[in-house]
Image: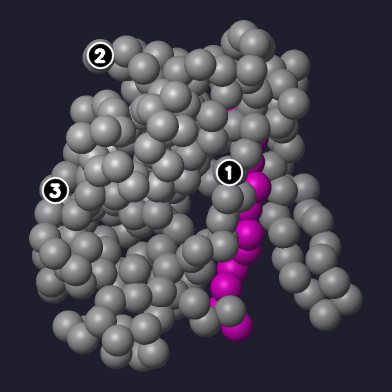
């Protein structure tokens, strides 16, 4: 399982780390839903994908291939210098991968996805982690009715050759969920580094043409934008 771990209790989402744990199928089947208590279900120690601190990290997604092979994606915050509060940030889409997730000291590679230019662009801008998660006040019930929130409508997958696929929306700065102000929805595919599948690592055959998905009055229209795409998974360090 992949999850964010905040530094402070709800509704303060600032500074969250991204971590994962793993367990065997036998352990999970022997203790369905944790009914026998945590002592009877053996989960690994947490592995840190992105450390805590600063603005933090949000909304991790995961997809698994062969044994110990996982691709991950999440939004990482970079604090805006001089902003108030100090954790107000630009939020970037980050992809991560490990092909030895079950090892005691796994190797994890991460890369900030670059689009539509060679340098990464923020997916959201000018929000704290709590604002991104729809926690604009201190009352939990109030938050659910009065606050905007960041995207829940994005996803990850593997294609039939084990290449990591990500689709996500981008908004104008300072507009979380106002669809009239939405800019584009992006989709990209891995073009470099190891790929994962149920059998073995394979090499991508050709680069993927990134596209912009635009929902118009006549329906969904697909626009190809450029041949070069972000290298979603970088070479291992």
Q: Nearer the viewer, residue 12 or 114?
A: 12
Q: CA distance from mark 1 to mark 3?
A: 25 Å
Q: Is residue 164 left or right of residue 130?
A: right
Disc 2 vs disc 3: which is toward the camera? 2
Q: With respect to residue 223, does 220 lie above or below?
A: below
Q: Nearer the viewer, residue 13 or 116?
A: 13
Residue 187: in magenta span: yes
**Quadrant in which the C terminus appears:** top left
Q: Earlier in the sequence, mark 2 or mark 3?
A: 3
Write down the region rendered in magenta: 180-191
**Quadrant in which the N terminus appears:** top left
Disc 1 vs disc 3: which is toward the camera? 1
Residue 47: in magenta span: no
| Residue at x-position 52% and y-position 81% | 178
Q: CA distance from mark 2 to mark 3?
A: 24 Å
Disc 2 vs disc 1: which is toward the camera? 2
Secondary structure of the residue carrying numbered label 1 = strand
Colouring mode (rainbow / by chain / secondary structure / one colour): one colour
| Residue at x-position 32% and y-position 59% | 90
List the residue tagged with mark 2. 104
Q: Position of residue 54 (x, y in %)?
A: 15, 52
Please say whether residue 49 is visible from this viewpoint. no
Tag 3: Cα neighbours inside 10 Å, few (<14), some, or many (≥20)? Answer: some
Q: Of the numbered discs in the image, which one, if any, rests on residue 156? A: 1
Tag 1: Cα neighbours inside 10 Å, few (<14), some, or many (≥20)? Answer: some
Q: Of the numbered discs in the image, which one, if any, rests on residue 53? A: 3
| Residue at x-position 37% and y-position 83% | 144
């Amino acid at each position: 399982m992949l999850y964010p771990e905040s530094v402070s209790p709800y509704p303060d989402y600032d500074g969250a780390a991204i971590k994962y744990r793993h367990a065997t199928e036998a352990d999970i089947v022997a203790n369905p839903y944790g009914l026998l208590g945590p002592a009877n279900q053996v989960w690994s120690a947490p592995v840190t994908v992105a450390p805590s601190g600063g603005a933090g990290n949000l909304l991790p997604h995961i997809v698994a291939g062969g044994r110990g092979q996982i691709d991950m994606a999440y939004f990482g915050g970079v604090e805006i210098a001089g902003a108030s509060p100090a954790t107000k940030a630009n939020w970037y889409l980050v992809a991560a991968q490990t092909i030895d997730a079950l090892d005691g000291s796994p190797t994890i590679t991460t890369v900030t996805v670059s689009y539509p230019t060679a340098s990464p662009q923020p997916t959201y801008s000018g929000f704290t982690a709590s604002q991104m998660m729809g926690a604009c006040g201190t009352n939990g019930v109030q938050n659910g009715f009065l606050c905007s929130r960041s995207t829940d409508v994005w996803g990850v997958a593997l294609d039939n050759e084990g290449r990591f696929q990500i689709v996500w929306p981008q908004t104008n700065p300072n507009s979380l969920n106002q669809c009239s102000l939405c800019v584009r929805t992006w989709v990209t595919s891995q073009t470099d580094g190891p790929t994962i599948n149920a059998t073995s690592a394979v090499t991508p055959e050709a680069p993927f043409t990134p596209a912009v998905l635009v929902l118009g009055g006549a329906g969904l229209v697909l626009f190809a934008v450029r041949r070069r795409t972000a290298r979603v998974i970088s070479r291992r360090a």
